[in-house]
Each structure stands twice: as C-alpha cells, then as structure tokens.
DNA sequence: AATGAATGAGGATTCATTCAT
DNA sequence: TATGAATGAATCCTCATTCAT
C-alpha cells in the first residue's frame, strides 16, 4: 500500500466527481469511461485507467465519496435523535432532505445500488444496520414484532425509490421536508403497534 | 397485421422465454442478443433479429409475456378480495406468492422496471392504478389521509424489492405465504388509521 | 432453356415492377431484397430468390423492362426524324419527354447506369450506337470532326444528369418540352460546325 | 477545437489516403471500414472509428483532402486564364489533366458526388459557381442565351463522366491534353454563338 | 409453384484496457 | 505523472441466399 501524492489524490477526486455526475445523468449502465473523461475535461480514457485499477475500482471510489458526503450530512440528524422511533424518523427525513443538497450523489448511489454494483461495506452494510436497529427496538418494546429482514428490504427500497424520484427533479426544501415527514409517518405507523409513542 | 404461422409463434415464444431467463440471470443491461441466442440454443443472433424488429420489440414481447403470466396468476386473488384493504392485501400476497411459480419472470420484470425500459401500459400504468386505489379508499374512509403519490412509490418499490430478493432464491410455498402476509400486514398498518377494519 | 409458365412470368413482372420503383425511390445501393419484397407485397425475400438467380439477374430483368418501356416510347420519335441532326434532336427531346411518362423507370435506370451495375446489351450498347451515329454524321459532313468516343461520353452523361434531375421532381409537359429543346440546341451546336443545317 | 498531435494527423492522413483509394477501386457503396482498414494495413476497424467520428466524418475528410489536392492543381490554370471563355476552357482542360496526376482522387470524388454523399461547400457549391460564371458571361455578351441551370448540369456531369472514364485507365499526358482540348472545344462551341471570340 | 425459416457473413460503432513514450 | 494511440471483443442490425416442406 503506497502513499498517494497530492496530485494523484486531486486527480482521483476530479475523476470521481465527474463519474458521479455522469452516473446521475445517464445512469450506471451508460456511464462509460469516455463519457466520464469528456465530462471531466480529460482528453483520453487512458487517464482514468491509469488512476483506477478498473471500472470496479472507480465505482468503489464513487461509492466511498458519496457515502462520505451523505454520511456527514445525515450524521447530525441521527445524533440529535433520541430513541428508536426518533432515529428511524431522523434517518428517513434526513435522507429525503439530502436530495436538496446533493441530488447527483443521491441519484448516482441509488442507481449503483439498483444495479447491484456496489461492494462497499457502507452500502452492503445498510441492511444490517437497519435490521439491528429494528431488532433492538423490538426488544425494547418500541417496534411491534415483524420479520426484520423482509421489512428492512421493503422500507429501505421504498425510501430509495422515493428519494430517487425526488432527486430526478428536486423540489424546494419545504416540499422535501413535508415529503420526509410523510414517509417517516408511514414507516413509523408500519413498524409500531399503535401510532407513535417512544 | 399479418397472421403468424405456428412455427414463427413457437420460435418467438422460445426466444422470449430464453430472453426472460437471461434477463433474470444477468440483468437487463447485460442481456445481449448473443447471450440470449446461446441460451436459446440458437446459432446466431441474426435469428433473433429475424423474428423481432429490434431489441425494443423483443423487450416488449418479454414484458407482454410476463404480464400475461403474472396477470393470470394474480387475477383470481384480486377478484376474490372484497374491500379496499382486502384488495391491497390480495395484491401484495399474490405478488409474493407469484415468486414460487414464476421466479424468472418476476426477477426479469422487476429488473426491466428498474431500468425504466418498459413502455407497456401494464407496467407504466401500475402506479396510476395504485394511486387510484388509495384515493378511492381514502374517500371511503378506509385509508387514512396521506400523500398518495409518495406512498405509492414507496410501497410498490418496497414490494418489488422484497419480491426480487425472494425470487433470487425462492423459498417454499409456506414461507412465501408467511412473507406475503408479513408484508401485507406492514402495508395495511402503514395505510390505515388503526390496525385493520374494513 | 425451359419455357416459363404464365404464373412465373407474371410473378417476375410483379417483382421487377416493384424493384424498379424501389430503386427509383431509395437508390440502387439501398434497394435490398427485403425492401423490394415489402414493396411488392410479398411476405418473404425467398420468393425473389426463387424467381431470380441472384441480385444480378433481377437487375438485368429490371434493365430489360425499363429498356422495353423507354424504347417503345422513344422509337416513334426517332423514326419520325430525318437526318443525323434531327435524329440527335429527337433522341434528346424524347428522352427528356420520357420523364413525364415514366419517371420511376428513368430514375432507376440512371441510378443503375451510374453504379455501373448494368451489363445489358441495351445499356452497354448505347455508347456504341451514339458513336456510330456521330461517325456516320461526320462522314456525311453533317457533324464537325471531333473525338467521337469522348463526346459520346460527355453528351450521354450530361443528358442522363439533366433527365435525372428532372425525374427527381417531374415538371409539366410544357416545361419538359422546353428543357428538351434547350438541351437539343446545346448538343447540336456542340457537334455541328455552324448552327444547324441538315 | 482541440489541437491534433503529429501522430494523429499522420494516422488520419494514412486512413484518408487508403479510403480514397478504396473508393476509387470498389466504389463508394462498397467502401466499408474493414476494406479500408485492410487496405491501410490496419488490424481492426475500431482504429478508424477511433480517429473519425463516423463514416460521414471520414467521408468529409476524404472530400476535403481531394479538394485540397485538386484545388492546388487546378488553381494556377484558372488564374492564368483571362476572360469567361478562357476560364471555361481552363477549367475543363485542367480538370482533365488532373487525371494524370491524381487518378484515384478524381475517381473517388466523382463517385462520391454521384452518390450524393458529399456535403462539403466545395462540392455542393460547384453548380452555383458554374451558373454564376455562365450568367456573368451571358451579360457580358460572351455566352449566348441559354438555360443556365440545365446547361450547367449537362456540362458538369458530362465533364465528370469523361474524367471518370479517363481516370479508370489513365492515358499519357499528351493524350490527356488532347482530350481536354477536345472537350473544351465542345463546351465552348455549345455555349457561345459562333466559334470563339473573347 | 411457393414460402416461411434459418443462416452466417458483414455492416458501423462503442467499450475497457494496455502500452510506449 | 500523464497521455495519446492502439486494440480487439462485443454491441445490434441488415443482407442475400439456401433449404425443407
């Protein structure tokens, strides 16, 4: 594992940024090296291959960058939330709010996840985090009993879809907030016994 | 509209079947003519082009076939259901049950929908049907008030995801039935005011 | 050499007619069997291959048919003309007039000749006829001395081009007659010593 | 507009040269990328697509190159000619003489023009230049009155045909010179009232 | 006499990757 | 560190022709 020079780091960043925007625009399937190179203002695709081991490597870098960005946006929300229900709510609402700040990142990530082309721990770990959260909440008597795995899949995918739809044509912050609350309500109702309590 | 001979019809069916299986296996993006031809035991891709006007045409035929199959499977369930809630439940449960019968068809369709590559009225019309169902149920006082559009997206996508996951490695009928009920419960709770009533 | 049945003859005629129209419309290069079959109302290209030994054969049949049509149109003009100059004039004028009667045939033939795809004696013989005509006229002292071969090429090709242009968007008979006279004047001046005499 | 490297420029030139030769040999319609690649000693057609945006682009480059070559050959002739008739004569004679220097270029260009596959201003502008020349000459009283458009078509096409024939099997310079004078005589006689004057 | 089916070569183009400089 | 050049497989599609029925 050799260290990266400043130049290399910034070149990689430049390419990753371009790649994310291209994926957001034309979709993962059509995000070719040449399209990305053009978007980044590079004259050849060789440059990308030079800095990344392959398409998978570039993709992983994109995912990492997106997670960094989204993570730093959502973290404060999550930390400010107390209790299982509040945290679920915070996750949903901040994820929807994220669309207003980083629509390209959101669209790109969802498209990558859809195509099952992500191997990052953050992405593949999300289900586990949700499942654990639900399980803990059930033990605490906050969430009603349900099949944790199935519900996790349904809710995370549903959230992704709503977010993707919103990201395609981002509405204003107020509308996004309303949408977040709407979805949070839906999810809290779905997972708790009776309205909201804790 | 020229009539189709028996041979042509059966060749088309053979190709469509192969295409559906290939899409289910490797995904829409990688479902090339040559892969499909190989899978169908054909010696060349020209053969596919001979029977279908283009990739879009083949895709449309696949979607039509899948809808035929899934429709005839789900219809009895829907017709047997009385009331808005029961119908929602029937839709969800029969859609999950479908996995046991036609896993490839289910996986293929979902992947096609994901990639936004479907123009069939059946596929693109599903959201509208859901929205209308929810709206009517709200007026009837069965469903609680909520953003019909957003909820439709969340729930249909969540359902798709669960179904896709199940289709990837189809469990037995009993487990599928349980999964269906589980998801139906989730959705009914999410959309009604208080447990189930109508 | 076996005799042709009535059915075969009429089928061939049907295909030839369609082929001529297609060549006139889309050009020789793009006149594929399938386009011709479609235009002829046939369901498959096999039918064409059945009746014609190959593309060359079909082409030859087209040329023959076109020559038959154009020949029977132009012949009266030529027969009515007396003297070398008058005959040249008659050829040019009737060839231009032909556009009004059989634009598709004219356009098709010219396109075929352009592509050098004709081997028929009529087509490849036209230069020889012209050359002979000029030579005889020179001996009779009607045409001035010139390189018969070169002039033949220049004048026939020039005539073809004018005809082709006119055929692309056929004007009325009066305009065609004027155009014919114009061109005949040009050619007579070019080939005689001094205005027109014999 | 990005600058071209030396290698790129020379590769493009190599491909263009090969393409011109192939078009001259087998005709525009059959000048496929693979034929051109083979002729140029390249191992794959991908190489051509790498250097040219598409077939149109390659074609445009060929036309440009041909025009450059023919232009620099004919220009001195035209500049040395004084008066409308002399210029017409110079154009015809130098165009025929060109065959001795660049037979492939001449044949290729004519085939391209025939197929109407050229969009370059030089090519599509030729008729207009001729028409203008004739009109001016008519006003100057040098050319007799005639339908400028029709005559332009006839004469340019006739010239092309003669040139193409000569290019197919280029004769020596003396014979070419004679052929040029022959055709120039023909055209001058055709367009002036009485022999040559200005 | 006819036809629908099948074939396989060939069309242009895009792609990710390698390599010498 | 960077880059332009090259590669060759893979993409979908069209073509003329053959063949069994």
Image (tube, coloured by chain):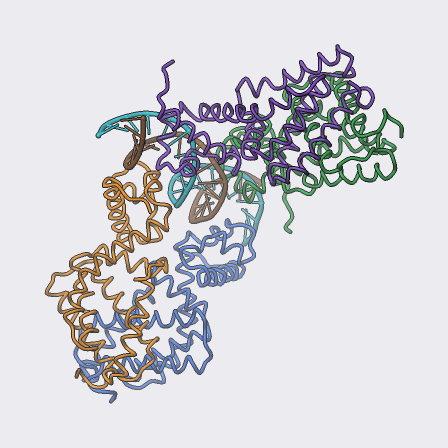
Chain colours: A blue, B orange, C purple, D green, E brown, F cyan
- In the current view of this chain or complex, which residue is farthest to the top? C139
In percent of the image, x 32 and y 37: which residue is there? B44
Residue C69 horizontal/vertical position (percent): 53, 26
Residue C157: quadrant of the picture: top right
Residue A96 vertical placement versus A43 (above, below): below
A97 lies above or below F10: below
Closest to the observer, D70 or C104: C104
Residue furthest to the right: D198
Residue C135 lies, with reference to residue D162, above or below; the image says: above
- Which quarter of the figure has residue A60? bottom left
> Can you see residue D113?
yes
* Farthest left residue in view: B174
Please state if C119 lies on the left or on the right of D179 as rendered. left
Residue appearing at x 77%, y 31% in the figure: D74
Left or right of residue D134: residue B134: left
* Front residue of A176 and C153: C153
Percent position of residue B181, x then y: 15, 72
Residue that extends furthest to the bottom in the rendered view of this protein: A197
Percent across and percent down for residue A28 are 41, 58
**One can see residue D109 in this view:** no
Q: Position of residue C84 (x, y in %)?
A: 71, 17
Quarter holding residue C161: top right
In the picture, which quadrant includes the C terminus of chain B? bottom left
Label tally: 0
In front of the other: B164 or C132: C132
């Amino acid at each position: 594992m050799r260290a990266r020079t400043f130049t290399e780091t910034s070149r990689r960043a430049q390419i990753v940024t371009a790649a994310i925007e291209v994926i957001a625009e034309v979709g993962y399937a059509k995000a070719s090296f040449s399209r990305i190179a053009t978007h980044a203002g590079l004259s050849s695709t060789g440059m990308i291959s030079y800095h990344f081991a392959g398409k998978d490597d570039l993709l992983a870098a994109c995912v990492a960058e997106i997670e960094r960005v989204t993570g730093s946006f959502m973290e404060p929300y999550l930390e400010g939330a107390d209790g299982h229900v509040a945290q679920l709510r915070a996750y949903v609402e901040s994820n929807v709010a994220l669309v207003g700040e980083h629509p390209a990142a959101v669209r790109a990530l969802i498209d990558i996840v859809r195509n099952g082309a992500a191997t990052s721990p953050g992405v593949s770990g999300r289900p586990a985090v949700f499942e654990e959260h639900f399980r803990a909440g059930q033990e605490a008597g906050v969430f009603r009993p349900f099949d944790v795995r199935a519900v996790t899949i349904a809710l995370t995918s549903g959230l992704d879809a709503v977010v993707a739809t919103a990201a395609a044509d981002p509405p204003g912050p107020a509308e996004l907030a309303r949408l977040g609350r709407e979805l949070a309500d839906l999810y809290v109702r779905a997972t708790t016994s009776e309205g909201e309590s804790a």
